[in-house]
Image: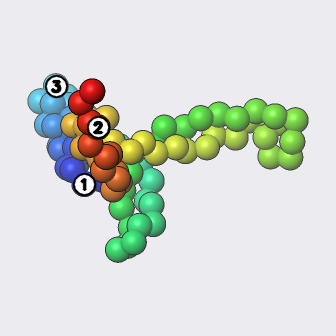
Amino acid sequence: MKCNCISDLNKKMAEHYREKLGVAVDVECQNTAFILVENGMETRLTTGFKLTAQAKGFVKGKVIPVTGNYCPFCGVAVVNIPAKPATEAA
Ligand SMILES: [Zn+2]
């Protein structure tokens, strides 16, 4: 991610539940994955899609993680999006 939304949310939720429960709370987003990129690895938010088919490994369903191109919290692109060519006014 090119933003800090996940770590910020982890901190905000830990503080919110610490106040609510009266004890220290550890928070860790469960829908993240490490993705190989040009300069190393990045953490990306994932959404699981369950595939079911009459094929080996898919009969009971197999969850495939999918990542988005934009952060769902702040809208910042998490991948390099090629610029669109300018359109001419008619
Ligand atoms: Zn964000």
- Callout 2 crowding tier (Cα within 10 Å): few <14, some 14–19, many ≥20: few
The quadrant in which residue 5 appears is top left
Q: Is mark 2 within 8 Å of ligand 1?
A: no
**Of the residues tagged 1 and 2, which is closer to the observer?**
2
Q: Position of residue 68 (x, y in %)?
A: 42, 42
- Mark 2 belongs to which amino acid? Thr
Q: Could you say which is closer to the camera, residue 50 or residue 14?
A: 50
The quadrant in which residue 26 appears is top left
Q: Which mark is residue 87?
A: 2
| Dot 3 and dot 1 residues touching (CB under 8 Å) | no
Please report whichever mark, 1 or 2, sits nearer to the chain's N-terminal start: 1
Q: Could you say which is closer to the camera, residue 60 or residue 79?
A: 79
Q: Does 78 sit left or right of 20 as displayed?
A: right
Q: Give the SS element for disc 2.
A: loop
Q: Position of residue 88 (x, y in %)?
A: 26, 36
Please report whichever mark, 2 or 3, sits nearer to the chain's N-terminal start: 3
- Mark 1 belongs to which amino acid? Lys
Q: Does 1 sit left or right of 66 as displayed?
A: left
Number of numbered labels in the structure image = 3
Q: Does 45 sit left or right of 14 as displayed?
A: right
- Residue annotated with mark 3: 20
Q: Is mark 1 within 8 Å of ligand 1?
A: yes
Image quadrant for the C terminus?
top left
Give the spatial CA distance, label 2 vs label 3. Answer: 52 Å
Q: Which mark is residue 2?
A: 1
The colour scheme applied to this rendered structure is: rainbow
Q: Does 29 sit left or right of 12 as displayed?
A: right
Give the spatial CA distance, label 3 vs label 1. Answer: 31 Å
